Image (cartoon, coloured by chain):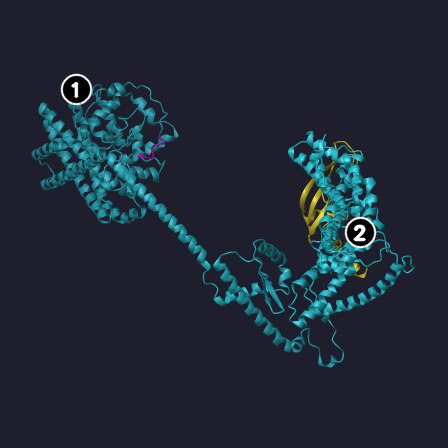
Chain colours: A cyan, B yellow
Amino acid sequence: MSFFGFEQSDLEKEKQRFLEGGIQDTENLAVFTWGEESYDGLGDALQEGGDDLNDETFGSTGAVGKDFDFSNTGGLHDSVALPGYPESSKDPLNQENPVFQTKQTVPAVQVQSSLKSIPSRSLESLWDDKSPFSVLPRNNGTARSTSSSSPFASQPTARGLQTLSHGVSQPGVRTLAEIEAEMRAATQQSREVTVHREKLLRRQQEEEYLREQELLRQQQEEDEYLRQEQEQQRQRYLYQQEQLQIQRLQQQRELLQQAQSTPPPRMLPVSQSPRFLEHQRQILLLQQQQEQQQILRLQELQEQLRMESLERQLRAQQLNNLGTHHRQLSGRSISPQLQHQRRQRSRSPPGTIPLQDNLSYHPQNIQLQQRLLSEMAQVEFLRDMQGSNSVEQEALRMEAMRKIVEAEKLEEKRRRRAAKIAHMSRYNDLMTQSDKDFITRIQVSQLVTQDPYADDFYAQAYGAIIRSRMGIHSQDERVLKFGSSGGIGLGIAPKGGHRRQSAMQKMEQQVERIVSNARRREEEKGLHSLHSLQGALGKTSGRSYKAAPRQLLQVDSGSASSSPTLSHAHAHISKQDSIDAKNKGKEEAAAEAAKLGREALGNAADTSSDLIRKDPLSRREILTCLEDLHDLVLKAEQLKQEEPLPEETQFYSEWEYEYSGVVDQMWNQLKVMAPIATSDPHPFMSLLSVAKGKRVLSRLARHFDNQQMLTMLTLLIACFNQLDVFKQAPLLDTLEDTPERVEVERQTNAFLSNVLHSIVSVISNGSLRLVTGLLGLLLDRNNVSEVAQTQPGLSLLTLFLTRVEVIKEGAAVLETELPTVEDANQWQLMFDHMFEQLTPDFPLLFPSSRIVARGFHLNQATIAVDIIDRPVWQFLAALALHALPEQQPILVHSLREKVLENVVGAKKGWVSDEQERRAKLHNVDLFLSALGLSSSQIDL
Amino acid sequence: MDSSTSSIQEPFDLIRLSLSERVFVKLRGDRELTGILHAYDGHMNLILSDVEETIMIVDLPEGVAEGQGTVNVAKRKMDMLFVRGDGVILVSPPSRT
């Protein structure tokens, strides 16, 4: 730092300004960071040396901008980092803060000189600006200037002002009340600062002594200043004394605070709980009042001392060169200096200072410093320790962290599970066992029905199918029955699961109990039913007994007995109803019998005028009739299920009566017995014209006896040309994919699989005479060629022929049914007749030929010719078997072309694949083998 | 035919007659179906098989007067179809020629 160019007048002006309180302009720069936790200790080194070039650094900065960032002034040390003024911003603080300044005389003056070397205008302009930020540092400065006499309060005051009375400009000298207010505000934060203050004080003292030493050296060099120096020291000691008293008070307070469960000072965190601060306030206020007086006294002393020291220092520095002040003093060199200081202190003149006070101070001071040192050492040691073991510690820490995380995870998992269980078991034991039983009873009671099998029909049927497929032939239905009153369908037998099985048994037992209880109650109620019902619809006055009360509900006792819950289709017929039905049925049967008698006569006469001619059934009639038939079938099937054992004679006869009644109804509904000439088509044929009519026939057939079936078959054959499948058959010989053709195909398939199927059993049990008679009927009433050109007709004819073949073989025929010679002759007659009629149209029997004849081009890709022709080959083979030797050449001759076509096609490879070739040859061989020939014999 | 008339008591009985028969179903949104009716319920939900659906799409370009638009017909076939009852307007036996 440069001491040259320092003008006395400046000092005088400074003094003047200070006294006038106008000092705050420069005080705005006062920013004090020593003692802050973040303080880096650079202040020590900063003060003592390396300042040579400061002048060059700062002195030449002529123009300083006003664009300082003062918004960061929230933290005091932030303003230290004012751009461009790292040191000067700190130094004015020393200068303007007499409390700290008194013993730092040398650097203080140095700083001032450096400051003054900068054009004062720039400094003024810097702080005297109009920017909104200028308020903040100014407040800082004013706060410091007034409270600076109290070292412990200086910093907090500044902060307190900043926060409490932000933006309020303060005059240079303030009243006691103002100071008090500041102090009070300061105590709000005093706790967090006390530690810093302590450190600060110590460091200040250290520095003070160091500088003292320097001064002493100067004194030795310059004797003329010795006296002044002594005087100065005396005054300084006087001040020190004052300061120490304050310090002691402060230490006492600190001790008090520490006693109140505060952590050790060095560990005291910056932030403390506000509650604790509040607690401290009372004590602090008391102490502050004591301190106020001392502070005022100190201020006077400081003023005096400061002026003196300034004067002296300046003079001394003017004499000394700049270079003589090179000193590198670090914190480590404190201890020897302290000893020196002590020596110096003892040597110094007592003056007005009481000796005991001075003495009492020293040990304490040393103790404090030593403690500080040891703390520092400890911190350093710890830092070293950490540095050396950092890798190891890091590894340990990671391991620990990992373990902690794992444990936390496990704990979390466990807690979640526990929470889940707790959540689930929230309602445990909310219901008693009897509650549960009650609920179960309600639920089960909903399952009880009058007809468990029908209500569980699909499950039962499916279960039966599954059982039969699995090879288990248990006849038991999965139905719980309770006498005759009702039961529960159990669905399909559950597989495995013992627990479920037992639960099922438990339920069964419970249900049985419930039902029996209910029945008993019902019986009891039945006894009093009359009484219980009386008055149910409201009482009538005694007088109006004669006039019967108006009936609100028309309850028919007859229909009331039938369960309304049952669906229409599965209508259960109560006894009353069934008896009615039977009576009705009997009546109908009687009427029918009378009619039949008449018709039988008419049939015999055939042209009798008695014949009741009717219009053919309308479609709606057909459908309605079929619905009724379906109902009857379902009823009959259900009755069949309930068939009692023949031993239970009474039940059985009842059942039989009911069942036969239903079967009779079905028979009548089928209208088989209507005279053949009643209408065209015959009502029965009309019923068969519908797909579901065809389908229901196979179900009806099970309930009809053989005679009924035979009658039906006779009617069918007699009216074969009235069948839709016969009439619509030509449609199948087209390749057009029309909806009609699809419909015909559907109907044909339904006929083949249902109607013919149910008739097969009749024919396959029929005698030769029967078959002959049926064939005769067919030939008589139909054009056999046309019949043979339909798929159903061809199938029927094949059926006849195979049956006769079987009879001829004599394999499955009973002795009694052995055909007589007469029968055989009759058959042959019929066969010849049929053969004769078919002969011209043999080629047309083949669908493929018919399709070609209709002008369609046969393409193997679109239609499998061999598959549709196969039934024809089969028929022809059967025909060939029955054909007389003289008939066979005719057969072969008429079919020669067809046979050759197939054989050539197969042998020349005019086929798409091997499968087709084999199919062709198979078809041909089927026919040829019947004649004792083979396709291999055909030579091309 | 006493019994045949007696079995018809409510409208649904008429639909019942058409069970497993081909029916014509008119639907909302200019759609029509023909198919074999397999099942129905009180909501007129239907199960049809072998269904052909006909959709009328009326194209009414800008500036064309009402009723002047062209009607396009789209058809498609389905093996099995569940028809939700709320769209059914009409169920009838197909017209017989």
**Magenta span dominant secondary structure:** loop
State yes or no: residue B30 in magenta. no
Q: Residues under labels 1 and 2: Cα distance?
A: 156 Å
Q: Residue at x 22, y 27 (%)?
A: A46
Horizontal and vertical percent position of residue A558: 72, 70
Q: Left or right of A534: which side holds A232? A: left
Q: Left or right of A475: which side holds A312? A: left
Residue range corresponding to the magenta coloring: A70-75
Closer-to-camera residue (A27/A343)? A343
Callout 2 amino acid:
Trp
Callout 1 amino acid:
Gly
Q: Quadrant of residue A330?
A: top left
Closer-to-camera residue (A462/A15)? A462
What residue is pinned by disc 1? Answer: A323
Q: Residue at x 31, y 22 (%)?
A: A121
What residue is pinned by disc 2? Answer: A827
Quadrant position of the C terminus of chain A in the picture: top right
Is residue B76 visible in the rendered image? The answer is no
Disc 1 crowd rating (10 Å Cα; few below 14, some 14-19, many 20+) is few
Does A798 appear above or below A106? below
Disc 2 crowd rating (10 Å Cα; few below 14, some 14-19, many 20+) is many
Q: Secondary structure at mark 2?
A: helix
Q: Nearer the viewer, mark 1 or mark 2?
A: 2
Quadrant position of the N terminus of chain A in the picture: top left
Horizontal and vertical percent position of residue A806: 72, 51
Same chain under badges 1 and 2? The reply is yes
Q: Chain of mark 2?
A: A
Q: Residue at x 68, y 41 (%)?
A: B78
